[in-house]
Amino acid sequence: MQNNLNNQIDILLVEDNPYEARLTISSLQDQNLANKLFHVDDGAEALDFLFAKGQYEDRENESNPKLILLDLNLPKIGGLDVLREIKANDKTKSIPVVILSSSKLDADVVTSYMLGVNSYVVKPVDFDVFSKAISDLGSYWMLLNESSVLLLLAKTRLVA
């Protein structure tokens, strides 16, 4: 699902598997959470999108997504390297990132948390369980969780 790139994007989905991307988008649509979703299928494109480079150089890069759903096993640049760049940059480090991966490797989970991921979810194999997990994730991060951007603004005002 592609939107006008100068409009606010709520969710950036970084997933190279077309089936899993469609399933994720469909599950979020069921919760009315996919209206402002943008999907890319490799790590290099995700970074270009976030930092308004390459084909996205005309995008207003002050307008960050509210949530990033990130696969680990991506072509071009892997998910851990994408996460590393997101969390190392002052403009993007407060964006919540949820890893959606088929990997249960302890090293992937530990490294993800050490790099600053907000949540790590192993993709369920069962269609219904996967769909429910995505719906629950979307609802939590988009509707229930207090935005880290709002918290940063509040802290700035308290300090000033």
Image: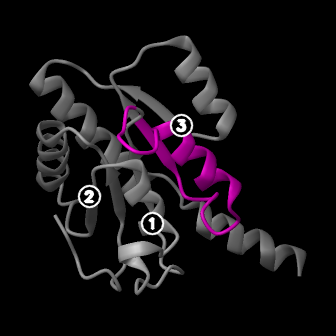
Is residue 81 visible in the rendered image? The answer is: yes
* Residue type at numbered disc 3: Leu
Mark closest to the chain's N terminus, 2 or 3? 2
Residue neighbourhood size for the residue with mark 1, other residues' Cα within 10 Å, grouped as few (<14), some (14–19), many (≥20): some
Of the residues tagged 1 and 2, which is closer to the observer?
A: 1
User: How many labels sit on residues?
Assistant: 3
Packing grade of label 3 (10 A; few <14, some 14-19, many >=20) is many
Question: As displayed, is residue 118 above or below residue 37?
Answer: above
Which amino acid does the dot numbered 1 rest on?
Asp
Q: Secondary structure at mark 3?
A: helix
Q: CA distance from mark 2 to mark 3?
A: 18 Å
Q: Is residue 158 magenta?
A: no
Q: Which residue is mark 1?
A: 48
In which quadrant is the C terminus drawn?
Answer: bottom right
Residue 93 on image: x %, y %? 64, 57
Mark 1: secondary structure: helix
Residue displayed at 10% across by 25% down: 127
Residue 23: image quadrant is top left
Task: State whether residue 81 is above or below residue 36.
Answer: above
Tell me: 58 left or right of 160: left
Q: Residue at x 26, y 63 (%)?
A: 37
Looking at the rendering, the stretch of residues picked out in magenta corresponds to: 73-99
Mark 2 or mark 1, which is nearer the start of the sequence? 2
Q: Which residue is mark 2?
A: 39
**In whole angstroms, how far apart are the C-alphas of marks 1 and 2?**
13 Å
Disc 1 and disc 3 in contact, CB within 8 angstroms: no
The residue indicated by pointer 3 is 80
Q: Amino acid at mark 2?
A: His
Position of 62 compared to 16: left or right? right
Image position of 98 with respect to 146: above or below = above
Is residue 65 shown to the viewer in this render?
Answer: no
